[in-house]
Amino acid sequence: MRRAEFEDNSKSYSFNGEKAGDFVSENPELKRRKRVAQYNIYSKEGKLKSSLRNSFKWIKSKFVDDYFQD
């Protein structure tokens, strides 16, 4: 009997969230906020990658110039 109770409980929950009353998918404002937050994350990742790339280029140019000038 316990196994049947466990199986019934396991069907009501998904690892991605609760199946019953999936409130986020029904609310357009929450979907919009989540989407905008994701855009902001992508933007920050792009800025960080660009900054690191430019920093490495600058360091490389400084060391390479000094090495070949000697």
Image (spheres, rainbow, N blue to C red):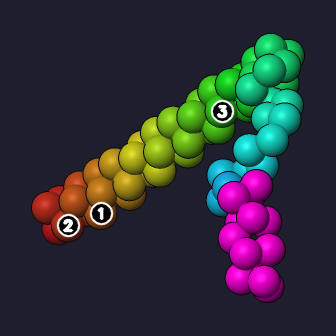
Q: Which residues are magenta?
A: 1-13
How far from the left and from the top, in percent, is residue 67?
20, 67
The residue that mark 2 highlights is 67
Mark 3 to mark 2 CA distance (whole Å) = 43 Å
Q: Farthest top residue?
A: 28
- Residue 6 magenta-drawn? yes
- Residue 25, percent from left and from top: 74, 26
Q: Residue at 56% across / 42% down in the picture?
A: 45
Please give the label number shown on residue 38: 3
Q: Quadrant of residue 12?
A: bottom right
Percent x, y for residue 11? 69, 58
Between marks 3 and 2 in the image, the one whose residue lies nearer the viewer: 3
**Tag 2 and tag 1, C-beta contact below 8 Å:** yes
Q: Amino acid at mark 1?
A: Phe
Q: Quadrant of residue 47?
A: top right
Q: Label 1: which residue?
A: 63
Task: Please name the amino acid that badge 3 sits on.
Answer: Gln
